[in-house]
Amino acid sequence: MRARTTALLGVGVLVLAAGCAGPQAGGPPGTGPQDASDETPLVGVAMPSVELERWVGDGENVSAQLTSLGFDVDMRYAEDDPATQVEQLRAMVDAGADALVVASVDGSALSDVLADAGAADIPVIAYDRLISGTDAVDYYASFDNHRVGVLQGTALLRGLGVVDAAGKPTGAAGPFAVELFAGSPDDNNATVFWDGAMSVLRPYLDSGVLTVPSGQVQREQGAIQGWAADLAGERMTSLLGPYRDGLRLDGVLSPYDGISQAILAATAELGYVPVVTGQDAELDAVRSVAAGEQYATVYKDTRQLAEVTVQMVQALLDGGEPEVNDTTSYDNGVKVVPAYLLAPQEVTEDSYTKVLVDSGYYTAQELR
Ligand code: GAL
């Protein structure tokens, strides 16, 4: 179900590459050609980019599950460009989509097009990333993103020996030299991950057990636009000065596996492997964890996320109310978006077989 190397989609899924014009409706929203000729509900799925490995799996899971329930699916990847995503969503609205599932590139850039969706009574589900600044988002399907950050911060501390396996302080005095990376500034999740990680790291930064030799301790300073590996590699390389001169780089807080792998590549010249965290359990990262390189990742079962999302779509199209488990955490500036949040799980060299192979997320063979 979850091939990771191609973005091929199941039969019945309408695939449109970024930049291609979608089916254009002649009439007002809701009366597009697909609606007129076909009673099958059409679900528009907007995904950010095939360049970041996880979204390929997400897209496949969502579209396969929607298709198996009998929906038509129009899924598009936006090449990580907010304007492209707006165009794609507009085409979906114009084509008479019955519901939209949106993993945003820039969560604050969709207000106009989603206002049109709202005016056409098309329900909108924010997928994984919150959509902000609009009331035209009905539900949010995601993970407990604060907890993701807590897991990342805790993994860094444990990898350094500052806390033990149970999370209890060991009394190690350090000082341990670390550098801090954050996600894309246009993604609400990046702030939530950072705040979660800092909630556990802050006391140790304040007490001097952890030091940040670059002095770059603000999220804005560590932010990586678009979560892009090349930018992360460049930033890491630009910070290497003192470490090339002999200071030991003990650890790096990384919010996402693509960034983690770039950090490990950039630090390879140091001749040792710092403690590096991550997220998403991407294939290369898990192989790296299994090989004792990347210290940890955070697994978020995107099959479950797809399931929650598809259930939301179905409930809405049946005229019902989707199940939620959080009605307080995600204020998007205009409304608190009711959410269903799934539990993330830490993965290390000791646990990857149990968490990822036993659950069928990867086969043992894939991880070799
Ligand atoms: C975030 C997502 C993370 C990671 C990152 C880069 O929005 O929650 O799991 O995938 O984007 O794609």
Image (cartoon, rainbow, N blue to C red):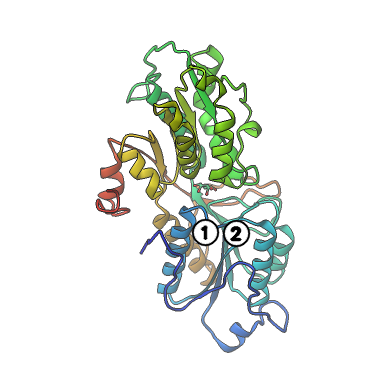
Which residue is at the far bottom? 37
Report the disc number at residue 79: 2
Chain-order first, disc 1 or disc 2: 1
Q: Please give the name of the residue rendered at 69% of the width and 72% of the height, measured from the top-left corner.
A: 120
**Cβ of mark 2 under 8 A from ligand 1:** no
Quarter that holds the N terminus: bottom left
Crowding near pointer 2: few (<14 within 10 Å), some, many (20+)? some
Percent position (x, y) of residue 319?
54, 70
Q: From the viewer's perspective, is 5 left or right of 313? A: left
Q: From the viewer's perspective, is 354 left or right of 85? A: left
Q: Amino acid at mark 1?
A: Val
Percent position (x, y) of residue 216?
62, 25
Of residues 6 and 42, which is closer to you in this image? Answer: 6
Residue ID for mark 1: 50
* Residue 67 sits above or below residue 292 on the image: below
Q: Is residue 100 visible?
A: yes
Percent position (x, y) of residue 311?
46, 63
Of residues 188 and 249, which is closer to you in this image? Answer: 249
Report the disc number at residue 239: none
Q: Is residue 328 visible?
A: no
Q: Secondary structure at mark 2?
A: loop
**Cβ of mark 1 under 8 A from ligand 1:** no
Q: Please give the name of the residue rendered at 63% of the width and 48% of the height, measured from the top-left corner.
A: 336
Percent position (x, y) of residue 173?
43, 10
Give yes or no for contact between labels 1 and 2 (Cβ–Cβ under 8 Å).
yes
Q: Please give the name of the residue rendered at 49% of the width and 40% of the height, measured from the top-left corner.
A: 262
Q: Amino acid at mark 2?
A: Glu
Q: From the viewer's perspective, is 153 left or right of 368? A: right
Residue 137's image quarter? bottom right
